[in-house]
Amino acid sequence: MDNERIEAAAARRARVGRTLTYLFLAIWALMVLFPFYWMLLSSVKSYGAYNSEYIPQFYTLSPTLQNYVDAFTAVPLAKYFLNTLIFTLATTALMLTVTVLAAFAFSRLEFRGKDLVFTLFLALMMIPGELVVITNFQTVTNAGLRNTFTGLILPSVTSVFYIYLLKENFEQIPDELYRAAKVDGTTDFRYLTRVMIPICRPTIVTVTILKVIECWNSYVWPRLITDDANYFLVSNGIQEIRENGFGRENIPAMMAAVVVISVPLIVLFLCFRKKIMAGVSRGGTKG
């Protein structure tokens, strides 16, 4: 009888604990998602309806898509989308090439000073990116690459963190596979493309997605290195909408532009969130 009471009490405590946990998570989810809801709601309110609200309304009975039309006509947002797509794809492709080759060299090849070079390489992670912005700006400017896609892309084609993450992942592959491949006469490049990359695909997919998100959200460097509207990215477009007075006056249209820019990343993350989590956890596990 005592055992039954103890088990019943333990079950009640477990139910209460789960209830409190779910309640906390639900409240936290509402806090996180509310800004996105408010952004989307504001984007479908008419200009007059939004300005006439002395007390913010959490719904609208007359949604409109005119704000999205205004956002695309206030600035050439479609052109900025194309520029951002070119910048994102080119930067991600070059970064993957550099990262995969560097991670392979540090994880499988033997050369003098490898450990020292990698240690110095990791030390770069201690330097905030903001400290090298001015140096990069001077280098790109002196090379005559301002207001070019090359100048936009070059400073972002490598990442110490991604190299380290992929190196740790590559090192989980048994050395016996590499030695067996070398006995069969397989070249290092063929072993990389036929064995290591397929095995480490989850981590590579994760790195790719994270880099795409990073490029899409780039603001400081594109803002600094470009003053020609032909090379503006979507982040520049949002700033231009705000600076020309249109965005400050027409908040619903400004919110519509933000929604258009945010949706691709939200969809990308929702589609690949499991791969991102799996890749990060795999990259940090030894064995």
Image (tube, rainbow, N blue to C red):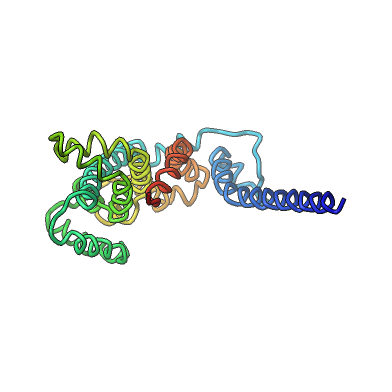
Q: Is residue 286 left or right of residue 248?
A: left
Q: Nearer the viewer, residue 149 or 279?
A: 279
| Residue 227: image location, x then y, percent | 26, 52
Q: Does 114 appear above or below 266?
A: below
Residue at horizontal 51 percent and vertical 47 percent from the top: 251
Residue 72 falls in which quadrant of the image?
A: top left
| Residue 148: image location, x then y, percent | 19, 47
Q: Does 177 appear above or below 162?
A: above
Is residue 286 visible in the rendered structure shown here?
yes
Residue 213 falls in which quadrant of the image?
A: top left
Q: Is residue 128 left or right of residue 252?
A: left
| Residue 31: image location, x then y, percent | 61, 52
| Residue 115: image location, x then y, percent | 21, 61
Is residue 260 visible in the rendered structure shown here?
no
Residue at horizontal 84 percent and vertical 52 percent from the top: 5
Q: Nearer the viewer, residue 92 or 186?
A: 186
Residue at horizontal 26 percent and vertical 36 percent from the top: 195
